[in-house]
Amino acid sequence: MITLTPLKSTQYTTSLFQRGLLQSHKSFSSITPLANNHKRSKEESPNNHPPSKNKRHFTSLNCNTPFTLCFVRHGQSTWNRDNRFIGWTDTPLTEDGVLEARIAGQMLQKSGILFDEVHTSLLRRSIRTTNLILMEMGQEYIPVYKNWRLNERNYGDLVGHHKKEMVKKHGVEQVKRWRRSYDEPPPAMADDHKYHPALDPRYRDMLNKIPKSESLKCTMERSSVYWDNIIAPSLKQEKTVLIVGHENNLRSLIMRLEGIPKEDVINLCLPRAVPLAYRLDENLKPLDRADGQLDEATGFLRGEWLGGDTAVKEILERDRKQVYDTSIEECLETGSSRDKWRTWMEFAIGKPQPEMVAKSAGSCLEDGGMGTSKRVA
C-alpha cells in the first residue's frame, strides 16, 4: 500500500525567448472527460474520502483546456550545472534552476491549464520546482503528494562523478547505455559510498528498498506501482494531474504511456522545465496531437511541448554535447550565452516574489551541500 504525504503548500538559448516561449498559448474551448470507473480505498485516496457507490464525478478546475496530464522535469540543480551524475543525491536548485521553474510555471499559466493535484518525488530539486510552478500559476492551494517511487533512478557507482570524465574513461556508447538503455544498469553503489541514500534520514524506514543501482527497467517497476495505484485512479476520476519529476523517472512513465519499444527508448531524452501536456482517452491512452504528428523534438511523443518542438530540440542537442562531446571543454550550463539567456528571461517574467528568491539549504556550497562545506562566490 502506498502512503501519500501532502505538502503544505541547459542552457536555454536566447532563441527560446525569441520564439515566444512566454507568449500566451491559444485558449482551449473543450475538454476531453475521463470516465470515473475506478474507486480507491480510503488509505489509497489522497483526499482520504471513503469510497461510495453514489459518489459523483470529480469536477476538475481545468475547464478551459483539453489537457488532462502534464509532465515537467525539475529545474537546474547544482549537479546539473556541474555535469555530475546525481541519482538520489539531494542536490538543490541553482538560481538558474529557480528561473527555469518559474518559466515553466508561466508557460503553464499562459496555456490556461489548471491542475487538481500534483505528484512529485522526495528530492528537493523536484519539490521546489513544484512549489515555484504553483506560485507562478497562483495554484499553491492544490494538494501536492510526494513519494520515493517518483525519485530519479539510482546511478549506482557513477553518482558524484563528472559525466564527461566517465565518457573519456568508458566511451560514449557505454555511458549512453548506462544513462539511456532499458535494462543495463550502471555498476552498483558500494555500501560505504559517500553519497549512499542510506545516509539520508528520509529513507530510514525503507533501507531494505534502497537500490544499489537502477536501469530504466528497474525505475519503471517502482514508478508503475505509483501510476497504477495513485495517478491512474486520479485521472479516471476526471482530475487534471501534474507530475514534476526527474528525467529517467519521467522517461519510465512516458515509455509506458506511449508504448515506446525497449530498443528505441535509448533515444528518448527530456529537457528540464519544459511542460509536456497530454490529452488522454477514457483508457488513459494518449490522443493524437492537433497536427496528427509525433513531436519533432524526440520523434516519439503525442504530447505537446508548451515551449515548442524546435526549442526543445535545441535544448536536447545542447544536453547531448554537454555529456558526450569531449572536444568541448567549456561547460555549456554556464558562460556568457547562459548569462545572456538569464538577462532576457528575468526581463521577460519580472522580479520574483521574496519566497521564490530564498536559496535552498546548501545551494551556496561547492557541491550543493552533499559533501565538503567549501562555499562558492
Image (cartoon, helix red, strand yellow):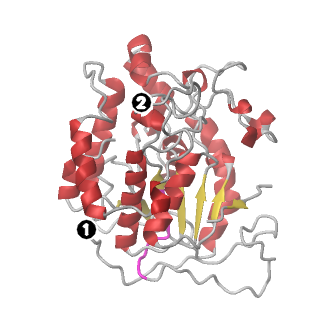
Residue 47 coordinates in the image, percent (x, y): 72, 72
Name the one closer to the observer, 148 or 69: 148
**Residue at position x 60%, y 45% in the image:** 123
On-image quarter of the N terminus: bottom right
Residue 127 position (above or below residue 218):
below
The numbered dot on residue 23 is: 1
Q: Using a 10 Å C-alpha cutoff, classify the residue at mark 2 as few (fewer than 14 neighbours), some (14 to 19) or many (20 or more).
A: many
Q: Quadrant of residue 37?
A: bottom right
* Majority secondary structure in the magenta region: loop
Q: Quadrant of residue 66?
A: bottom left
The correct choice, above or below, for 15 with respect to 22 in the image is above
At x 54% / y 50%, what residue is drawn?
126
Mark before the other along the chain sequence, 2 or 1: 1
List the residue tagged with mark 2. 82
> Is residue 46 part of the magenta span, yes or no?
no
Instruction: Please identify the quarter of the rendering in which residue 276 is found.
Output: bottom left
* Amino acid marked by disc 2: Asp
Q: Residue at x 43, y 11 (%)?
A: 169
